[in-house]
Image: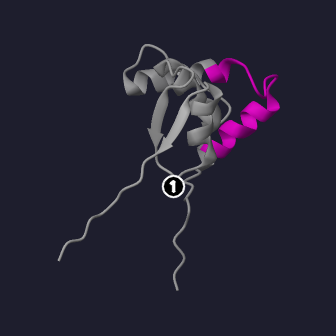
Amino acid sequence: MKAIPYGRQNITKEDIEAVIAVLKSDYLTQGPKIAEFEQAFANYIGSRYAVAVSNGTAALHLCTLALGVKPGQKVITTPITFAATANCVRYCEGEVVFAILTLKHTC
């Protein structure tokens, strides 16, 4: 049986050198590279702004805040996902509704 990879990385020599340069700098978790990345990303997607966050959960939380999810508001998501997809709605006190596809079979 051939395994299906969960994810594949494409890390270049330049990527490794960039990480080493940051590790040797005065800034590890903040600094000029963050602003540089945010600006490059914003330019790439054609946005005026971009904000770097620490992980996908934080990104989803910001998305729910940006969408204005209010307490008790229902938000539909898939049940086949990471917990963060539902948790970000709960952080805003929204109500998570899992979408379920029902197939009707008639003969």
Q: State the image coordinates of residue 2 (x, y, percent, origin top left).
A: 51, 81
Instruction: Name, please, the residue furthest toward the front.
Output: 107
Eyeballing the image, is 91 above or below 16?
Answer: above
Q: Main secondary structure of the magenta part?
A: helix
Q: Which residue is mark 1?
A: 80
Instruction: Name, please, the residue furthest toward the left.
Output: 107
Eyeballing the image, is 56 above or below 73?
Answer: below
Q: Is residue 93 left or right of residue 73?
A: right
* Range covered by the magenta-colored residues: 15-34
Displayed quadrant of residue 18: top right
Identify the residue shown where x is 68% and y is 41%. 17
- Element assignment for label 1: loop
Graded by Cα atoms within 10 Å as few (under 14), some (14 to 19) or many (20 or more), the crowding at tag 1 reads few
Q: State the image coordinates of residue 92 (x, y, percent, origin top left).
A: 61, 24
Q: State the image coordinates of residue 24 (x, y, percent, origin top left).
A: 81, 32
Identify the residue shown where x is 74% and y is 22%. 30
Q: State the image coordinates of residue 38 (x, y, percent, origin top left).
A: 55, 22
